[in-house]
Image (tube, rainbow, N blue to C red):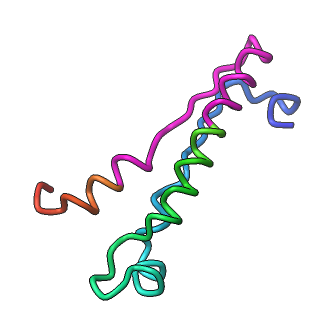
Amino acid sequence: ELYNLGARRIAVLSAPPIGCVPSQRTLAGGLERGCSEKYNYAAKLFNSKLSKELDSLGHSSPKSRIVYIDVYNPLLDIIQNYQNY
């Protein structure tokens, strides 16, 4: 639909590490309130499928530029290695 409206440059953000949001750390993070691997795995699976679909979509729309922007890995690194930032 965006393409039909004239959009030719489109950026799509990945899902963040949703297992690390405060509510999930409280509800599913155990005593240490760590990130929930279950929800982070779901986000990684979604991101993998999203990236593949965007590649396919980019090839079927030759005059467009569709960019996948990974926010999952940088945010997870900041959360897990906060002392480096």
Q: Is residue 11 left or right of residue 40?
A: right
Q: In which quarter of the image is residue 84?
A: bottom left
Q: 39 or 51: nearer the eye?
A: 39
Give above or below for 24 relative to 78.
below
Q: Which quarter of the rendering shows the C terminus?
A: bottom left
Please provide percent x and percent y for residue 73: 38, 46
Q: Is residue 66 above or below residue 73?
A: above
Q: Give the range drawn in magenta.
A: 51-75
Q: The N terminus is located in which quarter?
A: top right
Estimate the x, y position of residue 23 in percent, counting from the top left: 47, 82
Residue at 51% x, 65% y is: 38
Magenta stretch contains residue 28: no
Of 71 and 6, which appears nearest the observer? 71
Q: Is residue 8 above or below residue 51?
A: above
Residue drawn 34% across the image and 47% down it: 74
Q: In this view of the protein, which residue sits in the foreground, 8 or 62?
A: 62
- The reply, left or right, for residue 15 in relation to residue 77 is right
